Amino acid sequence: MYQLYIANKNYSSWSLRPWVLMKTLAIPFEEIMTPFTPVSSWNEFSAFSPSGKVPCLTHTQLTIWDSLAIIEYLAESHASVWPASAEARAWARCASAEMHSGFNTIRSHCPMNIGIRLRLSQQTPELKKELSRLDGLWNQSLDKFGGPFLAGDIFTAVDAFFAPVAFRLQSYDLTLSPTALAYADRLRNLPAMVQWQQAALKEVWREEDHERESLDRGTLLQDLRTG
Ligand SMILES: N[C@@H](CCC(=O)N[C@@H](CS)C(=O)NCC(=O)O)C(=O)O
């Protein structure tokens, strides 16, 4: 049995990636949640993750501590993690790697905070550039592979990599083309995404740094958290 270590569902965008993939592909796992602590969660997370970060997967005697490495590890035993065709698989790996190591402004300017709705005070040129790249990337692949998911007709790892973006678009009311917004909506409506979001809204933890990172960006319109 896999054990997946994650942090708060409201904030932890990296945790969401393997979680939504495993849920959607029906790969059984035990979820172990450790909430963030103020400033650094190193002490708590390094008890199970060598990098002191989540997500972290353990399986038999192995520990895999990075979201992309986790997904590649799962792909060794579960053929549906990546798309079947070599062309779609190559594209999906490029786009996942681009998300893994890029889109830094979307990540820092619009941190995942699922329960809030906020009007940004400004969209910097860098944010606009990344949103335009995101829009182009999604449109290109939906057109090329025929949708409704990025690499074709089934949900694969590349969709999991962009799943947190779907929540960021919703929280910060970011505008993309209708095709890209419809794709984000499709992601948010997946049963696993609905389940993650519902759990996030019920969480009781409010972590000051994560809250400030979001609230400093603009005007809070709504906080839908009930926990
Ligand atoms: N590249 C890593 C990034 C993991 C990461 O940054 N995780 C954040 C949570 S979403 C974390 O654990 N932060 C530790 C902290 O805030 O102290 C991955 O893909 O797994």
Image: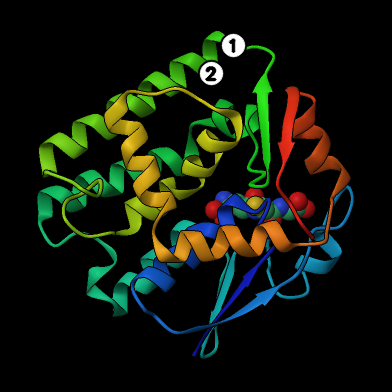
Q: CA distance from mark 2 to mark 1?
A: 5 Å
Residue plotted at (66% across, 59% down): 200
Residue 46, compared with residue 217, is above or below; it is: below
Secondary structure of residue under mark 1: loop
Q: From the viewer's perspective, is 95 left or right of 215?
A: left
- Residue placed under numbered mark 2 in the picture: 127
Mark 1 surroundings: few (<14), some (14-19) or many (≥20) residues within 10 A: few
In the rendered image, residue 129, in percent from the top left (x then y), is placed at: 45, 15
Residue 65: in sight, yes or no? yes
Q: Dot 1 corresponds to which residue? A: 124
Q: Is residue 54 left or right of residue 74?
A: right
Q: Is residue 75 above or below residue 218?
A: below
- Which residue type carries mark 2? Leu
Q: Which residue is located at x 49 percent, y 90 percent?
A: 1
Residue 100 on image: x %, y %: 47, 44
Q: For this view, does 15 lie left or right of residue 139?
A: right
Q: In the picture provided, is 189 more to the left or to the right than 126?
A: left
Is residue 53 visible in the rendered image? The answer is no
| Residue at the (47%, 42%) spot, across then down | 166
* Residue 6 falls in image quadrant: bottom right
Question: In what element is the residue under mark 2?
Answer: helix
Q: Quadrant of the C terminus?
A: bottom right
Q: Position of residue 219 (x, y in %)?
A: 75, 22
The reply to whether dot 2 and dot 1 touch (C-beta < 8 Å) is yes
Q: Residues within 10 Å of mark 2 (few under 14, many from 20)?
A: some
Amino acid type at image mark 1: Thr
Q: Position of residue 125 (x, y in %)?
A: 53, 9
- Note whether 24 is above or below 119 in the view shown: below
